[in-house]
Structure formats: C-alpha cells, structure tokens
Image (tube, grey):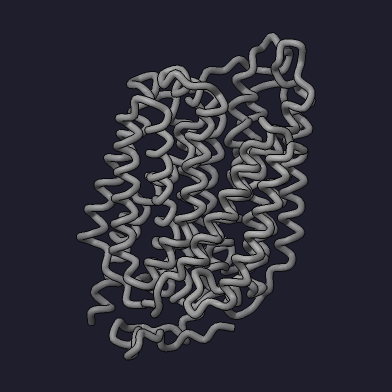
Amino acid sequence: MASETRRTHHQVTFAVLAAGVSAYALLQSLVTPVLPTIQADLHTNQNTVTWVLTAYLLSASIFTPIMGRVGDMIGKERVFVATLGALAAGSLLAALATNVQTMIVARAIQGIGGGVLPLAFGIIRDEFPREKLNGAVGLIASILAVGGGLGIVLAGPIVNALDYHWLFWLPMILTLISAVAAHFFVPESPVRTAGRISWAPAVLLSAWLVALLVALSQAPVWGWGSGKVLGLIAAAVVLAVVWVLVELRAATPLIDMKMMARPAVWTNNLVALLVGVGMYAVFAFLPEFVQTPKSTGYGFGAGITQSGLILLPMSVMMFLVGLGANNLANRIGGKKVVLMGSLIGALSMALLAFAHTSTWELYVATAVMGAGFGLTFAAMSSLIVSAVPAAQTGVASGMNANIRTIGGSIGAALMASVVTASPAADGLPREAGYTAGFAMLGAAMVIAALAATLIPVGRRTSRVDFADEPQHPEMALVPGGTVVGDKPE
C-alpha cells in the first residue's frame, strides 16, 4: 500500500526533481557569456577569471559520483535535499562575492550540486511506475542539456535588465524552492546499498580528475607541449590507473569497476564522452563566433543577448525531441536512437563549419543539433539505468554525466587550440579556425556514431526489466542491508 501511495504522486516527484536539475543545469552555463563582465567588475585578468568556470567543473566532476554513492547508501531523498542546499549556499556566496577568490570558492561549492543528476535518476528508478520510468529518465537527461543551452540564452536578458549578480540570485531562489519541495514531497527511496565510503578511491578519483581537467583547461594558455600540461596529463594517467587498482581491491568501492566494464555501460560512456566534446565546445565557442566583429569579414557583431538566442532552437528542439525519444526507442531500440542522434549531431556540426553567410543558417544548424542531442541524451540515459542493478543507478548515471563533462573539457580545450592557432593581425581568430574547429567536432560526433554501433542489444539495454527488482519497500532490504532481487548481468 505504501508503495502504491508513493507511485500515485510520481508526477509531483518528477516536477520537484526537474526543478532541482534545472537549477544546476542553468548554473553550468549562465556565467559563460558574461565572463568579461565578471572580470572587469572583480578587477582580475582573463586567466584568473577562467577559474570561475574551471572550479565549478572540477568540483562537479569530483562530487557527482560521490554524492550518487552516498545517496545509494543512506537515502537518495535526504542527499538530494542536502545537495540542493549546497548549490543554494554556493549561489548565495557567488551573488555576494566582491573579489574573484570568493567567486571561485563559491563556484566550487556550487559544483557539489552535480550530485542532483545521479540522485534524480536513482529516485526515479526506485519510485516510478515501470511504464513511466524510461520516459522520465530521458526527460531528466534532456532537461540537463536544455538547461545548459538556456543558460546562455538567458544570461544576456538577465544582465541587461538587472546585473550579473542575478545570474546567481535567481537560481538560488529556484534551488531553495526545490529543496523545500523535495523535503516534503519526494519520498525516501527504499533501495539502499550497504557499506561505507572508501576514501582512498575518492581521493584518487579527485586527484586524477583535477590533474586532467586543469591540464585541459589551461593547455590553450600554457601550450599543449608545455612541461606543465604534459606533466599533469602523465600524472592523471598514473593516478587513474592506481585509482582503478584500488577500486578493484576495495571492500566497498566508490565505483564498481565490474559494473563500469559492462558492455552496455562502457559503450554508452564512450558515446557520452564524444557527445560531450561536441556539445560543450559549441556552448563555449558559437557565441564567440557570432559576437566576432563584422569587420573581420565573417562575424556578425552580435551582443550577448543575440548570440545567446542563436542557441535557443537547440534548447527547444532538444526538449521536444526528448519528449518523444522514449517512444521511438521502444519501437526501434535505444541503440538505434543513440546512433541516429549522433549522426544528426554530426550533420549539425558540418552546417556550423561551412554555413556562415546568414544568421538563419546558424539557427537551422542549432535546431538540427538539438534534435540530435535530444535523441542521444534521452536514449543513452535510459540505457545506462537499464543496464545496472537499482542499487547502482546513482553511481552509474553519475559517472555517465561526469564523463560527458570531461568530454566537454576536452572539446573546449581542443576547440580553443584550433580556433586560435593562426590569429589575424588584429589578434582575432580567422574564419578558417572556426571552420576547422567545428569540422573537428563533427568528426567527434561521427566517432560517437561508430561507438554507438558497439552498444549491445539485450533484455536490459532497451527497456528496464523489473522482473528481478524489489517492488515494495519492505522487500527492498534484508538484514545486513543486502538488496534482494538484483541480478546483474
């Protein structure tokens, strides 16, 4: 009876989860178009202000799998509320920041909010009726990507009407409302994983991610062949190998390497990495391309608001396509949907590489891109959740989101190197740099399509199979905390 009561109100649960994920997604990209404004207001330089983005990225990469794991252990609802609390606290500190050091610390605190995604997936898997689960997972994944695009669209109007501090005040308000609603309306999930946090893997995970992402984010400044970049990349590789070995030997691993080695998991993670390369690089560089002065012969001289609007069709299409992606996956299979979405994404990158005559061409390109990414994200997230036991949903989906973020760091760093490789006499990039950069992103999407062909097709990779899942809270745990019914492949 308790289970049925919970499931009766799954629409309310979804609305609360969607609001929390939206707040986190908006904060991913709201500050990107206004970094020059923040730089001037906080009296800092370009290299330092980039850490406003880097600190957020590093923190999210570290805390996303950790918060997912903690939620699996002690309860997803309470950790979801705590994660939103950290996101709100970071937003408050950022809104009040009077120097760049405080702003960077605030953004690192906001990064803890990365845990909302794996926790939301876990709550959906535990609480939703089986026939609604795939669609809800796909929609949450789409909301994350849509929010990232909308952040860039909304930044200009917010700054013009108010000031950049409201880029933090408004998400803080939304986050607090979501946290209160989650406390009162989201039920605590019945599925738990016994054990404790293994701190050695957590420290090693943090160390290799920090080394890798700092190297990638600073490579365009320091140079790809510099000793610092090569040293950090080498350190990241060594630390990652040690991390895997420690995880394999840990009694309670932070991330189950056997789970990560499942064909349905590693193939989707590879697609996520490559799609992240394309999507986040477009978020970072398409507004710059549109804002380039007309005197260069290829730029449009757009302001912050207009350059953000170029990405609006992507956000709209991503959401609309995400609504129907589950039905399409049910008919033709999630693997084919991911493949189709990757190929459509490659087409959109080709349009961006060569269609520079009129702004309408860019609107078409971003609309096509939204359709491709909407299909890919919705289907890929459902495939990941379907491939693992319920108790590992948080960590598995968290790592998938994490890998997508890492792909974004790689894409942005590579794009920066290509675009700025041969600047014009005035110091601005040449059109050929953008053409080569977007073509490179298109190649990444083609490789993503090839990776999608490796995704296995089976009973647990196209639809969620609930035959072996606990259906009632009282059946979810036996003494000792073992989950009953999970039968990993």
Q: Is residue 103 above or below residue 23?
A: above
Q: Nearer the viewer, residue 104 or 26?
A: 104
Residue 356 x/y as whole percent: 72, 24
Residue 136: quadrant of the picture: bottom left
Q: Is residue 355 visible?
A: no
Q: Is residue 19 above or below residue 34?
A: below
Number of numbered discs present? Answer: 0
Q: Residue furthest top?
A: 295
Q: Is residue 305 above or below residue 458?
A: above
Residue 93 x/y as whole percent: 31, 36
Q: Residue at x 32, y 83 (%)?
A: 472
Residue 463 appears left or right of 299: left
Residue 85 appears left or right of 400: left
Residue 113 x/y as whole percent: 39, 50
Q: Residue furthest left?
A: 184
Quadrant of the rendering where the C terminus is positioned: bottom right
Q: Nearer the viewer, residue 191 or 40?
A: 40
Q: Residue furthest bottom?
A: 479
Q: Residue at x 73, y 26 (%)?
A: 420
Quadrant of the rendering where the N terminus is positioned: bottom left
Residue 220: quadrant of the picture: top right
Q: Residue at x 35, y 34 (%)?
A: 94
Residue 266 x/y as whole percent: 65, 67
Q: Is residue 79 visible?
A: yes
Q: Nearer the viewer, residue 481 or 343?
A: 481
